Image: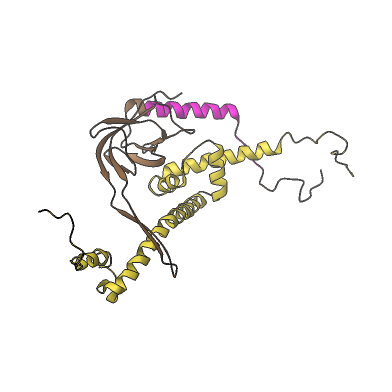
Amino acid sequence: VAKTSLSSPPWPEVKLPDPAEEAKHHAEVVQKVNELIAAGHYGRLFAVVHFASKQWKITSEDLIMMDNSLEAECGDRIRLEKVLLVGADDFTLVGRPLLGKELVRVEATVIEKTESWPKINMRFWKRHNYQRKNIIVHPQTVLRINTIDIFPCLV
Amino acid sequence: MVLLGAARWVRSRLTDRFWRRQEVLKHARHFRGRKNRCYKLAVRSVRRAFVRSTKARREKKKFLRALWITRIEAASLEHGLKYPAFISNLVKSQVELNRKMIADLAIYEPKTFKSLAALAQRRRQEGFLAALGDGKEPEGIFSRIVHHY
């Protein structure tokens, strides 16, 4: 085909590596990470957890405050299940979109259940004698992340 | 004899005017000028402050998202990817991290961000290959390409 402006795509030509070699390389990496996890050669683990419709980046001994109330009482141990990402210094496990429950375990304790400071909602239209003031106090919960554990069951 | 209310000819004076004014002035104590001391000026300033804080609560969400996007763009350009390519390829690879998380990872976990950028780059290349298809010409009469050589 003659070389015109539309005869080849506008992006540079792409060559992917050989699939067999790549599969071998992937298996090696997975085995190495599995060995690291099994031997416990990691320092502090961090995790990205989806909780209370927000995503949090947490480690152990972390405090988290949510803008709503939980059904658990103060002092209850809770397991956070929707884990999106777990990482240490040498490796990261990225979930697509979530990681398995047999792979990660994140535990937290409910510490405090309070109310927020009184937030003021005010609307005002000038020259119309219209003003409304509404004071909102909503419940908050404080959690302490106790532990993040990973288990060596990578495939 | 017990009277449940005062008689009509008994009149009362407002006695807690001071505290009603203090309720407004306490929100104005950190303002500048006479509006932190004088009630008539403080009422107007405090009302504007409350209205502005309600509106700002809605703008804060937009502002923070723009900030995260700027940070992600800067970090992904360091790894040779533009922001739309990075985000679209991450979403296509079923990684559901939101912009706040990716910005935090870019700041505090640079190695993790590098691996995410590599993932997005690889997915982008696979997308290019898939877009090219087989490289053969399409069949049919009206879609046939005429060769002049």
Residue visible at 57% across and 46% down in the picture: B85
- State which region is magenta: A13-36
Above or below: residue B102 compared with residue B49: above
Percent from the top left, x then y, of residue B80? 54, 49
**Horizontal arrangement in the rendering, residue B109 relative to residue B149 (left or right):** left
Query: How is the model colour-coded?
Result: by chain
Percent from the top left, x then y, of residue B39? 27, 72
Q: Which chain is yellow?
A: B
Residue visible at 32% across and 46% down in the picture: A138
Q: Which chain is brown?
A: A
Please tell me which residue lies in front, A100 or B75. A100
The N terminus of chain A sits in image quarter: top right
Above or below: residue B125 compared with residue B26: above
Above or below: residue A139 compared with residue B37: above
Please tell me which residue lies in front, B116 or A55. A55
Q: Residue furthest front?
A: B1
Is residue A91 visible in the rendered image? The answer is: no
Is residue B68 visible in the rendered image? The answer is: yes
Find out whether residue A20 is within the magenta segment: yes
